[in-house]
């Protein structure tokens, strides 16, 4: 029993409850060592598990939560620590003053398509960060999308998320909310990166329509509808209709890749088109393609729901994917609409949005209402890529409102520095990211800064620029 005033692990003072879910309860606490607020999540054991399953669940929950300490992204609530307890672990999370998207919908009703598209872009960025860590979320839904008071949109609650090791340890048990579970998780017992995209589509559907794609009287009926039916197109979605319908394709192979989703959502927010249109949706997979196995499985799941609530028995198979981007083979192709190729005097090439007029070795922007972009080349001089970014950080650390989000190496040998600060010259708060890479014995640092309020909408354009960048030919 958790009580107000309780000291957890000799460090975290419980203040008051924040949320209560089927698998956990979240409390606001104060880290007495750092003198800062945190969110404490107490995991609870689902009803209906055997003693052996309870032991597996305890081990799995702690290990999976610990894996999320590696995910550091502004659209993902940070996992700070995992504390062991006799019955179930505590998870220490970044405290984000916010309302969930579910709360916003309950209070305000359906949202305009443009606002939903902006939220969708931020959630997609969070999912891609999770995927790069070799994880799936598997419970994307409005109550797990936070709208922070500072304007950020953040993905939260990674209780059901799994690594490949966690999948094996859990022996087939994966959690999720029935209204937002992808069909393949129910019929075929698999969980894919595309499964998170289906859940994103269901969340966008709910946000713009005011209800999930399938609303039924009972959980069992909801599961059956998700497994066998194709949802009606959302009547309120307007320009979002096409991407939502595509994301909710029953066949995972028919769902659009993340770059296409980014393009479609960005177009609805009024950003220039950067990638091809979504391909026509293929005919949905028929519910009776696998009549024996699928229906027997659905009957079993429906029976389990009565015992385990939203605990759904599925076998999760993880297929990590690479970060989406422009293929190298297409880097010199004709640019898509709204973009152009810029060749610098030094011999590098990069694709830029039409409204950014570049000069020199790639410098663009200059007004607060524009992205600030520059690409710098130089010698490492014995430094590492991370050391070069850290040196650049020291130059603006004294700026008002400075906050570092991350300074980290990437698996491909590049490194990123993401931050926020007050730019006195432009007169506003900027959110920036710098990517540094090594080519032909030199480093190339790509700096991208935008107003804080437009970060989620503008970030996909940074990825397009980075993926298109071509250093000068080697000697």
Image: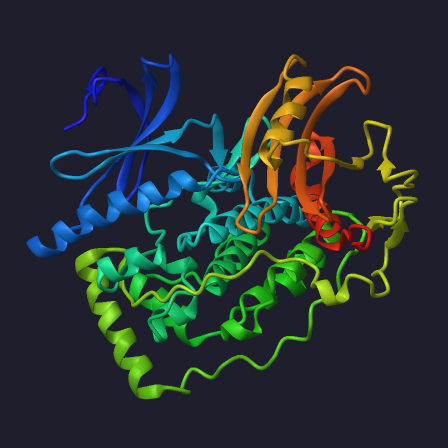
Asked which quadrant contains residue 90, the reply is top left
The one of 122 and 423 positioned closer to us in this rendering: 423
Position of 239 relative to 439 (above/below): below
Q: Residue at x 50, y 75 (%)?
A: 251
In percent of width and height, residue 17 lies at: 30, 26
Q: Is residue 187 left or right of residue 118?
A: left
> The C terminus appears in which quarter of the rendering?
bottom right
Position of 181 relative to 103 (above/below): below
Q: Is residue 50 visible?
A: no
Asked which quadrant contains residue 326, the reply is bottom right
Q: Is residue 319 visible?
A: yes
Position of 405 relative to 225 (above/below): above
Q: Is residue 278 left or right of residue 57?
A: right
The one of 474 and 73 positioned closer to us in this rendering: 474
Q: Residue at x 39, y 63 (%)?
A: 318
The one of 362 and 166 positioned closer to us in this rendering: 362
> The N terminus appears in which quarter of the rendering?
top left
In percent of width and height, residue 252 lies at: 50, 72
Position of 424 relative to 334 (above/below): above
Q: Residue at x 92, y 44 (%)?
A: 345
């Amino acid at each position: 029993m958790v009580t107000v005033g309780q000291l957890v692990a000799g460090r975290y003072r419980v203040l008051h409850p924040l949320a209560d879910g089927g698998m956990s309860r979240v409390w606001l606490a104060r880290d007495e060592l750092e003198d800062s607020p945190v969110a404490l999540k107490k995991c609870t054991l689902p009803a209906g598990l055997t003693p052996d399953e309870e032991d597996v669940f305890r081990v799995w929950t702690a290990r999976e939560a610990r894996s999320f300490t590696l995910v550091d992204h502004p659209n993902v609530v940070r996992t700070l620590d995992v504390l062991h307890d006799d019955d179930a672990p505590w998870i220490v999370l970044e405290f984000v003053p916010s309302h969930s998207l579910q709360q916003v919908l309950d209070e305000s009703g359906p949202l305009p398509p443009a606002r939903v598209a902006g939220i969708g872009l931020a959630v997609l960025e969070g999912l891609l960060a999770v995927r790069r860590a070799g994880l799936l979320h598997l419970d994307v839904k409005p109550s797990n999308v936070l709208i922070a008071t500072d304007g950020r949109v953040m993905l939260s609650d990674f209780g059901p998320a799994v690594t490949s090791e966690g999948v094996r340890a859990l022996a087939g048990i994966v959690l999720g909310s029935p209204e937002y579970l992808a069909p393949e998780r129910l019929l075929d017992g698999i969980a894919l990166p595309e499964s998170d995209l289906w859940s994103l589509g269901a969340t966008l559907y709910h946000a713009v329509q005011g209800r999930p794609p399938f609303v039924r009287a009972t959980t069992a009926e909801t599961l059956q509808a998700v497994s066998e039916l194709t949802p009606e197109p959302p009547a309120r979605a307007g320009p979002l209709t096409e991407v939502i319908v595509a994301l909710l394709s029953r066949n995972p192979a028919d769902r659009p890749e993340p770059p296409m989703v980014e393009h479609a959502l960005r177009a609805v927010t009024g950003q220039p088109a950067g990638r091809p249109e979504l391909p026509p949706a293929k005919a949905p997979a028929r519910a009776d393609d696998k009549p024996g196995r699928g229906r027997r499985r659905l009957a079993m799941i429906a029976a389990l729901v009565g015992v385990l609530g939203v605990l759904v028995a599925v076998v999760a198979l993880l297929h990590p994917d690479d970060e989406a981007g422009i293929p190298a083979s297409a880097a010199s192709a004709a640019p898509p609409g709204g973009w152009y190729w810029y060749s610098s005097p030094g011999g590098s090439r990069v694709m830029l949005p039409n409204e950014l007029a570049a000069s020199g070795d790639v410098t663009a922007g200059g007004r607060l209402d524009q992205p600030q972009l520059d690409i710098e080349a130089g010698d490492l001089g014995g430094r590492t890529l991370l050391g070069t970014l850290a040196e650049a950080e020291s130059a603006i650390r004294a700026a008002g409102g400075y906050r570092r989000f991350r300074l980290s190496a990437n698996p491909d040998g590049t490194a990123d520095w993401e931050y926020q600060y007050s730019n006195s010259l432009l007169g506003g708060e900027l959110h920036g990211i710098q990517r540094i890479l090594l080519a032909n014995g030199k480093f190339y640092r790509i700096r991208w800064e935008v107003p804080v309020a437009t970060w989620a909408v503008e970030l996909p354009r940074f990825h397009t620029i980075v993926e298109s960048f071509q250093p000068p030919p080697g000697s």
